Amino acid sequence: MNINQLFHRASHACGWLALVLLPCAVFAQEEATKDDGQENLNFPTATLGGAQFWSDELVFHRWRIQLNVFTGHYRLLDENDYRRAWGTFEQCKARLDAFRLEKDLPSMKGTAVVTLHGLIRSREVMNGIGEFLEQEGDMTWINVSYASTRRSIDDHAASLAKVIDNLEGIDQIHFVCHSLGNLVVRRYLGEATQPKPKWKVDNRIKRFVMLGPPNNGAHFAELFKDNKLFGLLMGPSGKQIASWPEVEKRMATGNCEFAIIAGSLTGSFTNPLVSGSDDLVVGVEETKLVGARDFLGVQLNHGQLVDEPYVQKKTLSFLKNGYFIAEDLRHPIESLAKPRGGK
């Protein structure tokens, strides 16, 4: 069991006590950023990989440059999540470039599949599907970590834009995301519709598979939007999902082909607070989005979607072929029933 897995389990068992205590350790360990052009003294230090307080802004294979969402400074992590440099983005990038030469790290090339986890989760939950797509699909896997509970969807999208801009050598980009991660990508793509775009949407993006996406908000979240504990644990992004109409205006799917896989439980296994079939968190109808090239319902709960082999195989099929099962068996979404409320 690696250090990320230990943190993930401990955080759930302790009721996210780490959200209060861990920043103290972070601040004690890492100083404020110096911007004097000099490389900061660094001792290779084991980290948790950036579970809730760091957002990736560059990913090179398994190396990553992360932004601390509290202090605004950056750090460079190697493939084992050891800190190799810290300071400004430029300082960390220069150190990464030096390591690339020193270690003769290969350039990235071909097709990249970018994975994003959901709310409260860490990037390790995407390991199973990411490794499968990398090995079976012959793709460069870019597993993005972001501070899901500490920043807004807009902030997550801005950091994702920097990750995408820094995918040097990549010819084509696919997305495979779980839950909130899908909204981050939709917000990234939606910037192209804004009057004064803060970033340019990359034209290398081709296909996008959404796993359990709250594409129409989540009624389950709406029920708790005024709860202080909900706000503390879920942060700005959780509040945005619970207050959907305003957020939706800044989202889009761009020109990429996208498809949706939804958990579709029935009977006594469903969430009584969600209308219709659901995955215990998001209703099937809440996942649907007009323009989807294909749609697939599976009898899995929200958390099972990323690790189920059947889902992984169908995800690869869509990325490769543009359909889950066959071209003549696609289920495109052309309109929405869009029911709201509980059962």
Image (cartoon, rainbow, N blue to C red):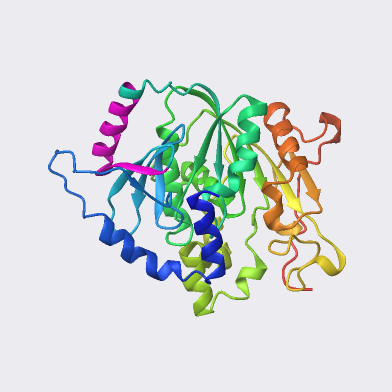
For residue 197, say whether it is visible.
Answer: no
Residue located at (76% from left, 33% from top): 323
In the visual, does 323 lie left or right of 230? Answer: right
Asked whether 126 or 285 is in front, the reply is 126
Task: Please check the rendered image and state whether residue 91 is part of the magenta-colored stretch, yes or no.
Answer: yes
Residue 113 in the image: above or below residue 249: above
Residue 342 location in percent, x, y?
A: 74, 73
Q: Based on the displayed image, in which of its 4 quarters is residue 340 positioned?
A: bottom right
Quadrant where the image shows the C terminus: bottom right
Residue located at (49% from left, 79% from top): 228
Asked whether 51 or 214 is in front, the reply is 51
Residue 71 in the image: above or below residue 49: below
Residue closest to the far left = 36
Residue 109 location in percent, x, y?
A: 49, 21
Residue 266 location in percent, x, y?
A: 85, 62
Residue 243 in the image: above or below residue 47: below
Residue located at (77% from left, 73% from top): 272
Which region of the structure is painted magenta?
81-101
Residue 292 in the image: above or below residue 122: above
